[in-house]
Image: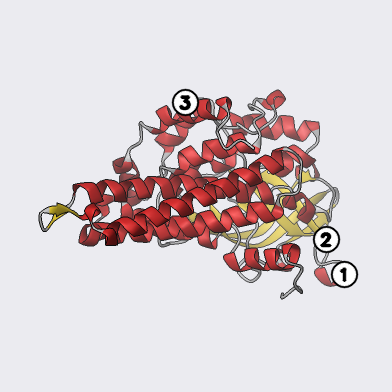
Amino acid sequence: MNFELSEQQRTIQESLGKVCAGFDANYWLDCDNRHHFPVEFFDAIKQAGWLGATFPEEYGGAGLGIADAAAIMQTIGALGAAAVSSVHINIFGPHPIVVFGTPAQKQRWLPPLVRGEDRACFGVTEPDAGLNTTRITTRARRDGKNYVVNGRKIWISTAQRANKIMLITRTTPIEECKKPTDGMTLFYTNLDRKYIEVREIEKMGRHAVDSNALFIDDLPVPEEDRIGEEGKGFYALLHGINPERILVAAAGVGGARATLARAVQYAKERVVFDRPIGQNQAIQHPLAELWTEIEAANLMMWKAASLYDAGKPCGAEANAAKLMASRTAHKTAIQAVLTHGGMGYAKEYHVERAYRESMIGRLAPVSEHLILCFIAEQVLGLPKSY
């Protein structure tokens, strides 16, 4: 059992760290204040060749595994949620294409993502379905060999800039299906604004990367834009769930470490009553405890990543890593604000932004409640509660 990063992972973090070093906290504060998509950061990541890191080499990617992708997301995560969200889809996002796409589809779709020419978003969540994806009502009906889609999606990141959308729909009403998970079909198609209204949602944090509500009216989708079999879209989505959990956890660990470092530095420098506040155990102990929790989340994340890359079951570990990392990142951000005292409430010290952004990991892409239900049912063998 080896707890050290591999030589390749160390190289990844060192090389990528040099790119990230060009975008300090003031850059991200400015993006947040102006609601400015971090296009400069995206372009730097693109020029350094990190887009498509997990895509197959024959389509322009680097063919890296999830553990290596975790090393990438952990490094980018130190910059904050906006940095992660600006590049996540291009680095890993369209995993169902890699697994279920035809060679022609992969050739058509993956290279433009690697080159940064295409920007994609995910159309999964709906206002009335929430986390119960089987209850989506966005419908794709046959029109000859093609489809026409109508419906609504919500909390769709980067849709203001995207030209592509991975879209889950119903092709068979749920009441006509043997199982609720049947009858859904997945597409990767053009985000055509003649048929899709994209309406931005004002939100608590991560102002540099937009979140949106989508209103889809008679969107024409060619049959060749369907991923996998008609009616089997939910199962295609499942193949991306565990890797997504792992990468969210990796980004959470990276963000928590950066926020803890900021709090520790302030505790060393801030002098009250003729001594640095970091000399007081009331300041020391919460920060020390957070270090232990961050490292525990980190170990669970690496365990999940190693299991996934080895082709072994990792659902419990991936979900646990996401739960632990997101909670710890949030707790760390709260303590960082408290360590800074009144200055923690000021934007110029950057921890209030970390606090606002740390809520995202606790809410998405899956709630803590469903993670705990999964572990209770699948690991502990308790009756299903929902």
Image point 73% across, 44% down: which residue?
A: 96
Q: Secondary structure at mark 3?
A: helix
Do residues under tags 1 and 2 come within 8 Å of each other at their CB atoms? yes
- Which residue carries the number 3 mark? 15
Quadrant into which the N terminus falls: top right
Image point 40% across, 49% down: which residue?
A: 208
Q: Secondary structure at mark 2?
A: loop
Res. 359 mark: none
- Does 333 sit above or below residue 166? below
User: How far across and down, in percent of the image, does residue 275 sit?
Assistant: 14, 53
- Which residue carries the number 1 mark? 176
- Mark 2 is on which residue type? Gly
> Which label's residue is closer to the chain start, 2 or 3?
3
State the separation of the CA atoms marked 1 and 3: 52 Å
Q: Nearer the viewer, residue 71 or 271?
A: 271
- Mark 3 is on which residue type? Ser
- The answer to whether 251 appears left or right of 287 in the picture is right
Q: Residues within 10 Å of mark 1 (few under 14, many from 20)?
A: few
Q: Nearer the viewer, residue 268 or 142?
A: 268
Q: Residues within 10 Å of mark 3 (few under 14, many from 20)?
A: few
- Which residue carries the number 2 mark? 183
State the separation of the CA atoms marked 1 and 2: 8 Å
- Report if residue 303 is visible in the image: yes
User: How far across and down, in percent of the image, does residue 173 sit?
Assistant: 81, 67
Quadrant into which the C terminus falls: bottom right
